[in-house]
Image: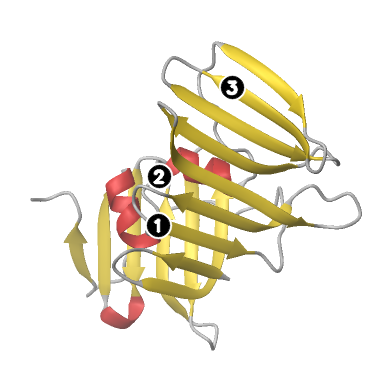
Amino acid sequence: KVKVSTPENSLKGTQVLLPEQPDRLRAETLSPFGSPLLLLAADGENLGVLLPSQNLYYTGIASPANLGRFVRIPLRLADLVSVLLHQPPLVDAGSEEAFELQEVGWLLVRKGASRRQELTFNFERQLVEVNYFDRDKLFLKITYGKFGKNGDRFPLLFGIELPEQKTTASLEFSDPETNGKLRPGIFQLTPAEGVTVVPLDEK
């Protein structure tokens, strides 16, 4: 279940997400009856988006701007995939400091030339929050929660916040599977004959 809130509008729905390192992603937005409303596939370089009900196919490079048109989260594809796999990107750091937090767990602070990253771990050493700062200004916050039982370290609840864009997103997974075998070509879409193709990168 996905919820996204931006200054323009709020969206919610049911999706199937297939992220694969380092920069491949497939997302299928489903209707209440399970039929696809939107199909998105990115193979690291190219992005394809199919809207079956409108007979439209959008195609272009997998840039943050093009990706943001459809997922409403203007992140680089590789960064978005890392976030979805509970492996958020690390900033280049010249120093690291660790602190024990009495009521939470541990805090790891990584500092670079102008950017800072704060990672919070619970007492089970699971990553539960990551904050990114640029010159002490928060520009990205990621939260993880609702970890599976029986030693499963993959979270079921994700939160993403971009304060400058006033954008928030939450994802709650109900049937996660890791390291699944994916069929070849799943990160590419081929529009059927007669579909209207819309280039995303033309002015």
Residues at marks 1 and 2, CA–CA distance in whole angstroms: 12 Å
Report x, y in % for residue 125: 81, 37
Q: Which badge, 3 or 1, is on the more N-terminal residue?
A: 3
Mark 1 or 2, which is nearer the eye? 1
Q: Which mark is residue 110?
A: 3
Q: Which mark is residue 75?
A: 2
Q: Which amino acid type is shown beneath numbered disc 1?
A: Thr
Report x, y in % for residue 24: 49, 45
Residues at marks 2 and 3, CA–CA distance in whole angstroms: 21 Å
Can you say which quadrant of the picture contains the N terminus? bottom right
Question: Which residue ends up furthest to the left in the rendered image?
Answer: 203
Q: Is residue 131 left or right of residue 149?
A: left
Which residue is pictured at 66% across the width and 51% down the height? 144
Which residue is pictured at 22% across the width and 75% down the height? 194
Asked which secondary structure carries label 1, the reply is: strand
Q: Which badge, 1 or 2, is on the more N-terminal residue?
A: 2
Q: Give the number of callouts.
A: 3
Residues at marks 3 and 1, CA–CA distance in whole angstroms: 25 Å
Task: Confirm whether residue 163 shows in the render.
Answer: yes
Task: Confirm whether residue 190 shows in the render.
Answer: no
Q: Is residue 83 left or right of residue 47?
A: right
Q: Which mark is residue 167?
A: 1
Q: Is residue 37 placed above or below 8 in the rendered structure?
A: below
